[in-house]
Image (cartoon, rainbow, N blue to C red):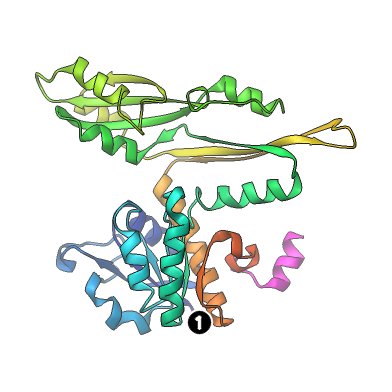
Amino acid sequence: MEKIRIGIAGYGNLGRGVESALLQTEDMELVGVFTRRSPDSLCTQTGAPAYKMEDVPAMAEKMDVLILCGGSANDLPEQTPALVQYCNVVDSFDTHAKIPQHFAAVDKAARESGRLAVISAGWDPGLFSLNRAYGQAVLPQCSDYTFWGKGVSQGHSDAVRRIPGVLDARQYTIPVDAALEQVRSGAEPKLTTRQKHTRECFVVAEAGADLPAIETAIKTMPNYFDEYDTTVHFISQEEMDREHKGIPHGGMVFRTGCTGLKGENRHVIEYKLTLDSNPEFTASVLTAYARAVYRLYQEGQRGCKTVLDIGPGYLHPQSPEELRKNLL
C-alpha cells in the first residue's frame, strides 16, 4: 500500500501529538518535522528528521500533506496561506470570530497555487461544529448550547502568567452543574456567560509578591475573567508540577427542543468529549483530516475547505465499500 506522506510544521505539544497519532495509522508515514528552531537541537520522539521551516518549498514534492501545528494568534494567519503555496495543508485555527477572514486568505492562496487546504480542523471548531450542524439540520426550531471543560485553557493560563509577580499558572474552565441540568432537562433556559461556566486558577507567585493584587488582576481581567465567577488558589511550584502538569479538556454540545404539531415531544441531543490531553486529541483530528485532504486533492479538489464541507467517509482509512458493510 502506498502511504500518505505527512510533514509536521511546528514541534510543540500539538506537533508531538501529530507525531504520535501517525504511529496509530497504517496508511500514513512521517517525512519530517519543520521547525523555527535549529534542527540540530531538535530531538523528535520517533527519530524523524528535522528541517528548517524555510526548507518547506524544497521538500514540498516529498510530502502529500503538511499538518500545521502553530498557534492561532500569531502563527497560522501567516503560515497557512504562505505554506499552501507549496503543498496541501491542514490546520486547527480556532479563533472563531476570525475564521471567515482566515478562510478567505487561505482559499485565495490555495486556488492561486492549485493546492488544497482544510482549516479549523480540531474539536472546537471542528467536531463540535459538525455536531452543531447536524443538530440544527435535524431539529430546526430548537436551541444550541456549548459547555467547555472541565479542562485547562492554555490561553487563559498564559494570560495569568503575564501578570507581574506570577511565576506559573494553570486555569481550569468548569461547567456549572445547575446550568447543565437545566439544559439536559430540555427546558431551553436563557443562560448568561456567568451562569454557564466558572473559572479556577492555580498560581505560583514570586516570593514577596502582592497576592491580593494578583488575585484582583486576575478576577478583573477584561475578555478573560471579568464575566465569570473566578476562584484563585496560590500554591507552590512543587504542587503545580505534581498536580497540574497535564493538559486535560473537553466539553459538550447540546441541541434541545420540541417536535410535533403542538410541540408535544421534547428532544435533547448531547455530544460529549472528555480528554486527558487536549493537544493529542486535536492532533488526532488533524491527522484524520490530512487523509481527507489527500483523497480530495486526488479527486481534483482545490482551494480551501472546512469540516462542514467534507463527508465523513473521507476521514476513515477504510474504503467506501468497507464502510457501507461495517458501519451502516
Spot occupied by residue 61 in the image (x, y as percentages of width and height) = 37, 84
State whether residue 276 is above or below residue 203. below
As helix, strand or loop, the secondary structure at mark 1 comes to: loop
Which residue is labeled 1 in the image?
Answer: 2
Spot occupied by residue 212 in the image (x, y as percentages of width and height) = 21, 15
What segment is highlighted magenta in the picture? 316-328
Quadrant the C terminus occupies: bottom right
Spot occupied by residue 36 in the image (x, y as percentages of width and height) = 21, 64
Using residue 276 as the reference point, say whether residue 321 is left or right of it: right
Using residue 136 as the reference point, say whether residue 246 is left or right of it: left
Q: Residue furthest left?
A: 208
Name which residue lies at 32% across and 58% down: 70
Name which residue lies at 49% across and 58% down: 121
Query: In the picture, residue 324 is in which quadrant?
Result: bottom right
Front-lying residue, 197 or 223 = 223
Q: Is residue 239 magenta?
A: no
Using residue 220 as the reference point, say whether residue 101 is left or right of it: right
Q: Amino acid at mark 1?
A: Glu
Q: Is residue 317 magenta?
A: yes
Q: Residue furthest right?
A: 261
Name which residue lies at 41% across and 55% down: 93
Q: Main secondary structure of the magenta part?
A: helix
Work out whether residue 26 can be spotted: no
Q: How many marks?
A: 1
State whether residue 171 is above or below residue 97. above
Front-lying residue, 110 or 33 = 110
State whether residue 259 is above or below residue 3. above
Using residue 254 as the reference point, say whether residue 152 is left or right of it: left
Name which residue lies at 69% across and 46% down: 135
Spot occupied by residue 202 in the image (x, y as percentages of width and height) = 29, 25
